[in-house]
Amino acid sequence: MKKVLALVLALLLVSVAVTASASMYISVISKGEQHAFWQTVRKGCEDAAAKWEVEMFYYGPPSEADIDLQVAALRAEMAKQPDAIALAALSTESVMGELQEALALGIPVIGFDSGVPGAPEGSIHATVATDNAAAAGMVAVEFMKMDGFVEALTGATPENPVVIACSSQDAISMSVSFRTRGFVEKMKELASEYGTVSVEGHPSVADPVAGASIIVHVEVGATATESDLLNAANAVLNKEGLLAVFCSNEGTARALLNATADGSELAEGSRFGHLIVAGFDSGAQQKTAVRNGWFKGAITQNPYNIGFLSVELAVLAAKGDAVEDVDTGALWYTADNMDDPEIAMLLYD
């Protein structure tokens, strides 16, 4: 009889433990779901929630231009008093009040993707993200290795300058802003060895210099909608003296491909075959462009780990455990290495 009671008690304890774990509620507020990147992030979140046996709510607005919808979703979730929140803010300034409230309520917040720089002290317990500035800087380094790139810089003059463009989705998202600045600063540093560099275009990074032979131009879409990104891509392609283009996320890469007949006009001998182009992230279109050599390469993050670790750290923070920032890393991939196991597993469709 005692053995039976002990067994029943043990089963009850296991049941209570599982119920207690399952009762934990984690709110994940993402930047969207329109890109394959975010769909892979969501898969990582879902797998982490399953591992820790917690209830998870996931929301991403229809577009990364829908800041108000994201803020409304965050407010709605805070009203449920979740055990923790994972947040990838579209606009850092738009969520400051909510973060202050979360801090007052004792709700730990994990930032992911770009995190929330400048958040109220103590509100963000940790950030899971790529070092976006360093990752974008890798593209500038790779451009310098491309056949004819340095020669073009050396041969440029103030009368006939070369243009190296950075196409960015917006100037609000911290991840995209960091990539833009990371690429611009590294390119300016490296190109200055071969001529005077002027940074032009969007006022957030512009540093114009008269008489420059090398122009780093930053083009930012009016909004993050596909039509505005396509307009921005066409504006870049119409630049006189254009030598190279860096597309700083999946949306801008897709826009450039759409502006060049799905990328076919970037092929050698075609209308834009002289351009050196690189992207960021992946997706089916961008992977095809890299494989065909229309894009010389691209940077891949680890979106699955970004999602998985965001939820995992949220659970740990909710339990009261100490958590730290995590850099999920980035890799440069080309047609030559994109099928290597360590890279292929990071290239989502």
Image: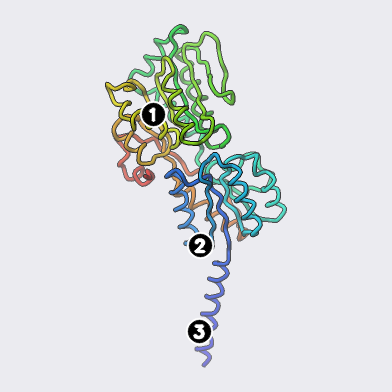
Q: In this rendered view, identify the residue nearer to me: 296 or 343.
A: 296
Q: Is residue 231 above or below residue 345?
A: above
Q: Residue at x 53, y 19 (%)?
A: 199
Q: Nearer the viewer, mark 3 or mark 1?
A: 1
Q: Residue at x 64, y 51 (%)?
A: 75
Q: Amino acid at mark 2?
A: Trp
Between the C-alphas of marks 1 and 2, the distance is: 44 Å
Q: Which residue is mark 1?
A: 259
Residue 166 percent coordinates (x, y): 47, 26
Mark 3 or mark 1: whose residue is earlier in sequence: 3
Disc on res. 7: 3
Q: Amino acid at mark 3?
A: Leu
Mark 3 or mark 2: whose residue is earlier in sequence: 3
Q: Which residue is mark 2?
A: 52
Colouring mode (rainbow / by chain / secondary structure / one colour): rainbow
Q: Could you say whether the residue bearing mark 1 is in a helix, strand or loop?
A: helix
